[in-house]
Amino acid sequence: MYRSGIATFTLDYGKCPPWLFERMVKLGREMTRVLIEEYGPDEFIKRIADPVWFQSLGTVLAFDWNASGLTTILTAALKEAIRGQEKDLGVFIAGGKGKTSRRTPDEIINWGEKLNLPAPKTQSLVYGSKMAAKVDSALIQDGFQIYHHSFFFSRGGAWTVVQQGMNPPHKIYVGGEYRMTEGTARRYHWHSENIKDFVCEPHSGIASQTKVKSPLNLTAEKSEKTREVSTELVKAGYHSLMKDIEILRKHSSELHKTLALKISSPAGDENLVKLLKLENIEFQHHPVEAEDFSKSRYLEKILWQVCDQQPENYEKLLAIKGVGPKTMRALALTAEVIYGARPSYEDPARYSFAHGGKDATPYPVDKKTYDQTIEIMKNAVQKTKLPFSEKRKIIERLF
């Protein structure tokens, strides 16, 4: 089974040389043609959603296995490679890096018009693109800011999102001194066939070389109660919600100190604990910060807006224009601290790209899937119209 997911890499700051990009476009055109002839457009879209398969394709096209630039350059090379041949191949690519990513909905709509797709089908594709971006920026708060978003789709309606977030180098306090962290990038994969619910476990086959400490993962199955209570808070109305938030604001500094403790039973300020209903909740190195509850006119404006619209479920709450990470975090922490609906603070990563990693952190690669992927790429290379010497060099990179 080909799974979608997340991959983490060190940041690349250089630019791809023109000669290399031109070569990647040429080879990408050959590989895409062969793979679509072999498996069909929908299966090609599905395989792009598998992070190991995507990574292997990038390696075939002469990029470093663990480079963050692989995502942006490979996507750009594939988009250029099929330019003018999209209808014949049955595969279409929208979006890209930076400003190009924000044009993704318009590009999808333009293709919908050229292909005479029914309006509801086109809008469904646009919705998939927008929600994937929103979920990975607002519901998975892992410290990575999305800067690349690409949308692959077929005429039949199958789609895949490949997007990447950046966590640049920053100072951390360790052992009595400040140190600079190593900048990293994290890639997020989605596939339409795997999505049963946009806001609950939409990623599968997640891959990462490193684990993030205490990320807020509101898509986890364990966060179901948080999603339910967050929606109920909005439905209860603005004034009711703000009463809860004002309690947290009033005690924000004490709250931060209390929740930072390892608590196996109520401890610390008994009145505060009782007030915030923490009797049955365990916290260990809780990531809540005092500024999460600081006054913000913009946050209050958005909360008024969502309460006024009365979304019927969590997905529709997230889909409201203007709702972002701070809104969803404020609702999640209110649901947790006041009502005991603790969300997941576990990194959703499930695989490691470091060939399993010597310590299998966070989890080892599925060796069977990895070997099958390499074999698929090897066979595809053999079927391209390339010189034998070139094929041999490419296959050597895969092993």
Image (spheres, rainbow, N blue to C red):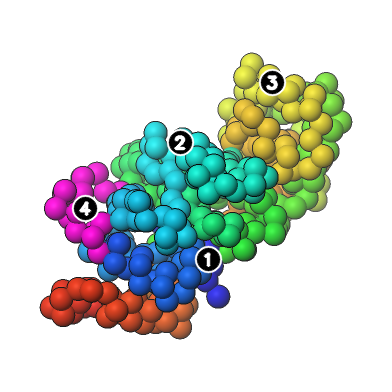
Query: What amino acid type should be assigned to the residue bearing mark 1?
Result: Asp
Q: Name the residue under label 2.
A: 103
User: Separation of disc 4 and disc 1 at Cα?
Assistant: 26 Å
1 and 3 marks in contact (CB < 8 Å): no
Q: Bounds of the magenta span? A: 11-27
Q: Which amino acid does label 3 sit on?
A: Glu
Secondary structure type for disc 2? loop
CA distance for labels 1 and 3: 44 Å
Residue ID for mark 1: 42
- For badge 2, the amino acid type reads Arg
Residue 52 lies, in percent from the top left, at 42, 68
Q: Is residue 328 visible?
A: yes
Front disc: 1 or 3 = 1
Can you tell which of label 1 and label 2 is closer to the viewer?
Answer: 1
Question: Mark 4 sits on what residue?
Answer: 21
Which numbered disc, 4 or 3, marks the residue that appears first in the sequence?
4
